[in-house]
Amino acid sequence: MKKMLTILALCLASTGAFAQSTSPAMGGSPQRMAQMEQQLQSRFANANTTQDGKLTRQQAAAGMPMVARHFDEIDTAKAGYVTLAQIEAFMVQRGAAR
């Protein structure tokens, strides 16, 4: 859970939506971490202009640049789209590798 939240923070920071550290070790509160999760969900929903729960490469490029940069890594099924669950799984995987 800690790693996922740290990766969420990195994701948000890479897109300019997040300016300060939120990990518990650095003074982040549970409320702030919940806010980060909500912000990720909100950004996904805003980028998903077709509202089908799937983010295409073009939608990612327009609304979630970090996802667009790693699109091929996240889209492991090579379906041409990614879901919020796939993005979260990628972030957890990246956190475990560090």
Image: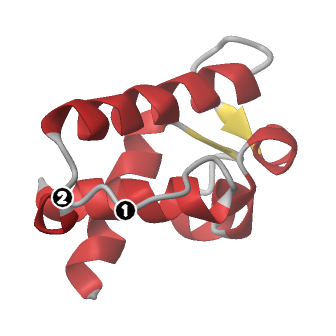
**Image-based side of 16 in relation to 23, left or right:** right
Element under disc 1: loop
Q: Which residue is mark 2?
A: 27
User: Residue 25's x, y, as percent?
Assistant: 12, 68
Which of the 4 image quarters holds residue 4? bottom left
Which of the 4 image quarters holds residue 51? top right
- Residue at 37 percent of width and 62 percent of height: 21
**Image-based side of 98 in relation to 69, left or right:** left
- Residue at 69 percent of width and 55 percent of height: 16
Rendered view: 85 above or below 7 = above
Note whether residue 36 is visible.
yes
Camera-side residue: 64 or 16? 16
Marks 1/2: CA–CA distance: 8 Å
**Image-based side of 62 in relation to 9, left or right:** right
Note whether residue 75 is visible.
no
Residue projecting furthest to the bottom:
98
Q: Amino acid at mark 1?
A: Ser
Q: How is the image coloured?
A: secondary structure
User: Residue 93's x, y, as percent?
Assistant: 29, 69
Rendered view: 18 above or below 53 = below
Rendered view: 84 above or below 11 = above
Dot label at residue 21: 1
- Residue at 21 percent of width and 77 percent of height: 96
Q: Quadrant of the C terminus?
A: bottom left
- Residue at 72 percent of width and 68 percent of height: 69
**Image-based side of 81 in relation to 50, left or right:** left
